[in-house]
Amino acid sequence: KNEVEQSPQNLTAQEGEFITINCSYSVGISALHWLQQHPGGGIVSLFMLSSGKKKHGRLIATINIQEKHSSLHITASHPRDSAVYICAVKGYGGSQGNLIFGKGTKLSVKP
Amino acid sequence: EPEVTQTPSHQVTQMGQEVILRCVPISNHLYFYWYRQILGQKVEFLVSFYNNEISEKSEIFDDQFSVERPDGSNFTLKIRSTKLEDSAMYFCASSEWRLAGTYEQYFGPGTRLTVT
């Protein structure tokens, strides 16, 4: 059983659309990360959340600890947002780096 | 903006050979990590390193793997005798130290290792 589940696996959107990517997890966590993986493979950290909501530009991340669920929203999507978006959680205990990763959501935004 | 760098970007090696993957973390960061991603699969944690020692390692990080901070800037991952299944993208990451809480991680661009 995967401890971190993302949906959808693949998402195609038209430029300008509002996008939501979901992440559900089954373990208790101290933090949740949203990461962006570019087509070339590089990974960029977008958000780290332990509660509530964070916003950066057109990106919004929310987390509901009780429901073990987080969402990543992209407003006014653009072709340059095309990437794989990865949810990763940090469980209780252990080192900071021991993250459990989801399989990712591949987003393609068409012009 | 400071960034994590990794060299080489692509390494091709023969099975049984030793490889060393290099990383330069962000200069004021104290926690360092290695992850790997086999093609088409999810990213997996390998090892955390702090204060010149391993703070945690995964089941993947067996005796064939080692990490080292040979000087004040580099952080290396060595695979002693590579196997075909070691072919993957290897990511280095670093984070700063804080008194409490969880730390944002900064990832390098990755080294693609191909074992033939």
Image (cartoon, rainbow, N blue to C red):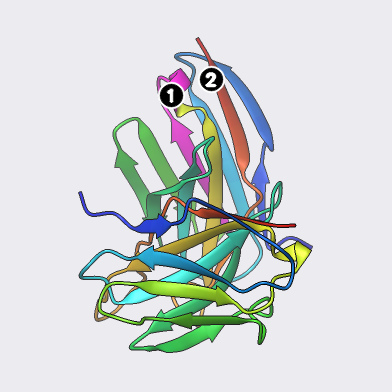
10 Å crowding of disc 1: few (<14), some (14-19), many (20+):
few
A17 up-or-down from B106: above or below? above
Residue B107 makes an appearance in the image: no
Rendered residue at 53%/43% (across/down):
A41
Q: Of helix, strand and loop, which one carries label 1?
A: helix
A1 up-or-down from B70: above or below? above
Which is more N-terminal, label 1 or label 2? 1
Q: Is residue A23 magenta?
A: no
Q: Position of residue A27 (x, y in %)?
A: 62, 69
Rendered residue at 69%/77% (across/down):
B81
Q: What numbered label is drawn on residue A109? A: 2
Rendered residue at 47%/87% (across/down):
B54
The total number of labels drawn is: 2
Q: Is residue A69 magenta?
A: yes
Residue B109 makes an appearance in the image: yes
Q: CA distance from mark 2 to mark 1?
A: 8 Å
Q: What numbered label is drawn on residue A80? A: 1
Region of the chain picked out in magenta, as a range: A68-80
> Residue B94 falls in which quadrant of the image?
bottom left
Q: Are circles 2 and 1 on residues that touch, CB within 8 Å?
A: yes
